[in-house]
Amino acid sequence: MQRPLRADAARNRERLLAAADEVFAAKGLSVGLDEIARHAGVGVATAYRRFPDKALLVDALLEDRVARIAALAEEALAHDDAWAGLVGFIEASLELHTSHRGLKELLFGGHGAALATRARSRLMPAVRELVRRAQEQGQLRADVEFTDVPLIQLMVVALSELGGPHADGLWRRYLGIVLDGLRTPEPRPLPRPPLDAAAFVETLGAPRR
Amino acid sequence: MQRPLRADAARNRERLLAAADEVFAAKGLSVGLDEIARHAGVGVATAYRRFPDKALLVDALLEDRVARIAALAEEALAHDDAWAGLVGFIEASLELHTSHRGLKELLFGGHGAALATRARSRLMPAVRELVRRAQEQGQLRADVEFTDVPLIQLMVVALSELGGPHADGLWRRYLGIVLDGLRTPEPRPLPRPPLDAAAFVETLGAPRR
Amino acid sequence: MQRPLRADAARNRERLLAAADEVFAAKGLSVGLDEIARHAGVGVATAYRRFPDKALLVDALLEDRVARIAALAEEALAHDDAWAGLVGFIEASLELHTSHRGLKELLFGGHGAALATRARSRLMPAVRELVRRAQEQGQLRADVEFTDVPLIQLMVVALSELGGPHADGLWRRYLGIVLDGLRTPEPRPLPRPPLDAAAFVETLGAPRR
Amino acid sequence: MQRPLRADAARNRERLLAAADEVFAAKGLSVGLDEIARHAGVGVATAYRRFPDKALLVDALLEDRVARIAALAEEALAHDDAWAGLVGFIEASLELHTSHRGLKELLFGGHGAALATRARSRLMPAVRELVRRAQEQGQLRADVEFTDVPLIQLMVVALSELGGPHADGLWRRYLGIVLDGLRTPEPRPLPRPPLDAAAFVETLGAPRR
DNA sequence: TATGAATGAGAGTTCATTCAT
DNA sequence: AATGAATGAACTCTCATTCAT
């Protein structure tokens, strides 16, 4: 438990996050902190006061993303058709990626610890419920778990950063195949059980191989 | 058309590739050429003589990987059961990734041009045939094309670099779902047509977004 | 319009200039920035913070030189005898070169743009006046212009970097011949008109052939 | 006394010189030996066999230049008007510089030893005679010596490498002034005596300050 | 507290020169 | 004798991070 930030400190924090977001979106994760700080209109050292190192700034950005994704999941719960809600959630959160170069780096670049922490508390309850209801309604194979959803997103998002004139929305095709796999009337036994909640957090939190 | 390298040059070239492979596997793509050269037992400048810049060394490594994958595809053609051959190929080539940290960076890191070039000539004919036969035998949905196979691999491989004690082979679970999507008796229309051969090459060859 | 440097930054800037001056004087312009920084007692990156690249460090050095030469020109204006003032100025500024190996490289090495810019604003007015008064007093041939003075210096300074036991002050002999050419009672028509002010700046500012 | 080169060795020597000349003219003295060797169609090591180091290749190039200049001096002796001959020689040899970027670097870059050696044996006798006759005919001030001529050239040539649209032939203007200084009817005493032959060689032969 | 300055380790790359074929 | 390969030191420049103002 920590005291809230002073007003100006909080403002600088927001400015830095917004600046980082813009700069990462424009140039990828490799830009230096100097540039981000300049973009935010603060000094570098101020950035270091707010975020002990660059990775933590990146993590904080993640937190914001996860919050948006969590909001999407909660909206999805409003759907009567559970399957439509689940699919709509997956698609909407993948669409977030198409507007942010560097976002996948963010999610895939070994920052999993933060992702997992955030995701557990904010995202998982809603997803668990989406999954439960879709299975209840017989639209989702019974051998999947709510922990599978983020991993499926992790997988499909890899396609969203392909470039060139034919790549736009190409990920939707492969998501289509995956979705057919999720509601197939003839599911084959999967070679591995799903991660349980603890293993899920540990896995996303682990450094990348 | 260029004359073959002199014996010593060729030996050093191999040493450099092997060293790069090991060092990339151990530490990721960001290691400096100095370290690679030292690991190979040659001077830095020798590395620059063999590979005009670092990207070309990475590309050369790719060529070797693609060659191995192409060999796997050709072996897969020997299977009587076309579906088993196709799945075996996909699994075997994904297994290559589990032993190499940095390999995904290699494939995803904007070196697509080289990948596409190599892949087109070496890999696509065999894969096309694998797909054709699996469809002929009724084991693979009719609306997929051979260009879908590498993209599916691209997708699943994203999972293969997760770390931690539960991540080993986790990709197999999600590949299972995808495979069920590929042979579902009730395929839904996919929202996008497959890439044709030309668009495929162009897409993998394009710089990443 | 830029705010003045912080005290420590300014001090390091001066240290770097002084170090560069000494090191260039001792070893010529080809020394690396590492050595200059070490000599100045600062890190390399500090040098790069103060001078975005090596050429700009060299340019800054030039500015200082030009400032000193401009001061000499202004002192020369105090002379009652205009010819003596002009000659004194030329000699004094050439003497600056004898203490600095690398200074000619500085002036001749394609850094003319900076030189020209500085020279125009700081040096030319005084030189113009020196020339005008010497002509008024009948001591300087009428067909020379103030733009000729720096070019004559450029010419004579080439001799000031000769080495060996007999080279000290040898340039004075040839300057003597040139001065005799400037006050000859029988001037022959010169094959080219002088540069006007604009062409002068353009010429010194152009990259060397 | 050394045996003449084998025919192929001599051919390579010539090729290297020609290549160096072209490449230096095009890109300045800073090009690497690899490029020169490639341009000459031989291996680098062959260049090192013919010229123990890069400086000696440069020196050998100088020898060729000096030979051409010596030829100009001998032609100049044919003039009846000794002054015209002398001036013609000076102008002609300066014109050689306008076609070769990097030639001044060659002459000024600390390669004086070679220059002096060559010049002494090949150039000085003719120049000495040109000077003697011009003085005999009363067209050249009595206090100059033949050793002054190359130094005057050294001086004027500094102007020949200025760039930009107004620089072509600009050196002729300043040579005009110098020439007026050489034939002024009112020579002032020069502050230094000329170099004698021995000092001249020693001075040009010394490393640059 | 917030700033800009400073840092040193390390990146990629080049070059004159020597060695092995 | 001639070649191309190999070398290592040096170069310019960048970045995440710490320090002094």
Image: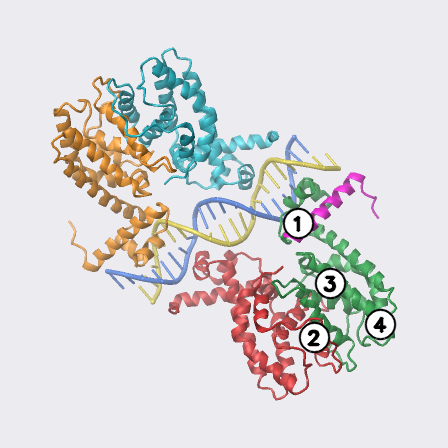
Chain colours: A green, B red, C cyan, D orange, E yellow, F blue
Residue A65 located within the stretch drawn in magenta: no
Q: Amino acid at mark 1?
A: Val
Above or below residue C27? Residue B203 is: below
Circles 3 and 4, Cβ within 8 Å, touching? The answer is no
Point out the tag, 3 or 4, that comes first from the N-terminus.
3
Horizontal and vertical percent for residue D136?
12, 25
The residue where tag 1 is placed is A23
Helix, strand or loop at disc 4?
helix
Residue C89 quadrant: top left
Residue at 81% from the left image edge and 60% from the top image edge: A72
Assign the magenta stretch its main secondary structure: helix
Pinpoint the chain carrying mark 2.
Answer: B
Residue A11 located within the stretch drawn in magenta: yes
Between the residue at mark 3 and the residue at mark 2, the CA separation in whole angstroms equals 19 Å
Same subunit: marks 3 and 4 = yes
The residue where tag 4 is placed is A134
Question: Which disc, if any, is residue B175?
Answer: 2
Crowding at label 4, few (<14), some or many (≥20) Cα neighbours within 10 Å? many
Q: Amino acid at mark 3?
A: Leu
Between the residue at mark 2 and the residue at mark 1, the CA separation in whole angstroms equals 35 Å
The residue where tag 3 is placed is A94
- Magenta range: A1-26
Circles 3 and 2, Cβ within 8 Å, touching? The answer is no
Between residue C86 and residue C131, name the one nearer to us: C131
Q: Which mark's residue is nearer the viewer, 4 or 2?
A: 4
Circles 3 and 1, Cβ within 8 Å, touching? The answer is no
Crowding at label 3, few (<14), some or many (≥20) Cα neighbours within 10 Å? some
